[in-house]
Amino acid sequence: MPRYAITTFGCQMNVHDSERMHEVLRRAGYTESDDPRDADVVVLNTCSVREKAEQKLLSEVGRLAKWKRTHPEMVLVVAGCVAQQEGERLLTRSQGIDLVLGPDNIPELPRLLDDIGLGAPPLVRTVFDLEAPRFLTAHSVAASAPTAYVTIMKGCNERCSFCIVPYTRGPERYRPSAEIVAEIAGLVSAGVREVTLLGQTVNSYRDPSSELPRAPGASPDDPDESEFAALLRRIAAEVPGLARLRYTSPHPRHLTPSLIEAHVELSVLARHVHLPVQSGSDRILKRMIRRYTRAEYVARVGSLVARLPDLSLSTDIIVGFPGETEDDFAATLSLVREVGFRGLFGFKYSQRPYTPARKLADDVPEAEKSERLARLFEVSEELLGAHLQRLVGSRQRVLVEGAGKEGTEAWSGRTERNEIVHVTGAEALDLRGTIVEVVITRANKHSLQAELSDEARASAKPLPAATVEAPKPRAAGERRSLPIVAMGGG
Ligand code: SAH
Ligand code: F3S
């Protein structure tokens, strides 16, 4: 049987796309190889959101191309956003690539590999499925992890001036709500406890099959309203076995009253929202074409938190956008404090091809960008540290995702608010996929340490004898969800 290996760069969409590629290849008779050097087909699923990510890909292609000189039978596939962005050009830029595959063309992968096997020259397939959008459904029989992603929409109709995603992922296309519900129900029967709905602006969702009733709180006159809240309600009603529901990433514009109402009423929704803000300066937000002001952002999250005071917020921020002055950056820092974000992905602005911001001079020096990023992380670490410290001694409910960091024997999982919790003193118990009550014993820099409550310990199952030494290591394809704090750079 031919063997394949997939390396994934970038965001959750890519992690999800890679999972679909695994399935498509397995069903076509391929088996997975841990080491790309033993594989007949090597797929690099790429990211182009920042230049650094793209450079990483090119150096990886270079490495593999060198290997290929002595192993000419290996087939090298470049998929994902760099594939979509560069298309044909990739074949001339990097030697050794056999197939360039866009994110919408994943279902065609086995057929294209067959063509290459029959001697076809290098192929490029990067066509958006605009007429009949395809969403691949997970075919899990037994879930490899207690958490899973489900795509509800793809593409993006916003035109944030820095962002290449509308170019690499195309315009917005939505998946019928019945199909989404069916996939989630299937995952839950396979053992999944928590689902994260995925989309570039996940909360702009509209049901193409028009099957959803208007959600409470939704005003027909509000141009920012969507059918996302109605979708959340349908999932909650029709998949009662689902323990937790998350979504990423929403756009602040669509954090409307109906979505706030859904958060208040649906207990399945986690108490955490990742809501990218990008900057705290109105001048910069305008140049970024984000289509909200700082005050509007603050008001929207304010009305959510007023109804749900224990909800955690995290965000994405870009530092060093063209024209960002020290005052603009100070406004960002003050916004981070004002909102009290407990998690933050920070990025240095990186000029991307085809983006409107290319017309603006990338005028903040690299050293200044690095310095601002460091100051941003300092503030976010301080906020997170104080928050974690306040939780010491409290009881929390943790969905145990799997074994902790390599070398430690703790189980680890997340609270509803997305704090990472390592559970110690439970090595002999089988906690995987269960929601357990814990008592927080210590705050680490980015996570919490905890012990099982007496009640949770009394009702936990022991691990089967053969696996008592340590919780199982992560299975292939298993992934961890968004960390509450990330130190993304460049
Ligand atoms: N809506 C998408 C956003 C995709 S890009 C989502 O669901 O996550 C993820 C983040 O990368 C953005 O929120 C932004 O903070 C950052 N980013 C995008 N383009 C960038 C660029 N050119 N330079 C630096 N950071 C960028
Ligand atoms: Fe990018 Fe803005 Fe869409 S960040 S993905 S263009 S919402």
Image (cartoon, helix red, strand yellow):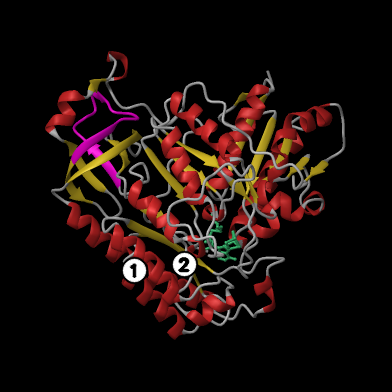
| Tally of numbered tags | 2
Q: Which residue is mark 2?
A: 277
Q: CA distance from mark 1 to mark 2?
A: 11 Å
Q: Which residue is mark 1?
A: 339
Residue at 47 percent of width and 34 percent of height:
478
Residue in the picture at 34% in, 68% down: 339
Q: Amino acid at mark 1?
A: Val
Image location (x, y in percent) of residue 271: 33, 50
In the image, residue 328 sits, relative to residue 222, either above or below, namely below
**Residue 226 in picture, x, y percent from top left:** 54, 55
- Taking depth in this image into account, of 197 and 208 the one nearest to the observer is 208
Q: Which residues are magenta?
A: 420-438
Q: Secondary structure at mark 2?
A: loop
Instruction: Assess whether mark 2 and mark 1 are in contact (beta carbons under 8 angstroms).
Output: yes
Which mark is first along the chain, 2 or 1? 2
- Residue 359 rendering spot, x and y as whole percentages: 69, 77
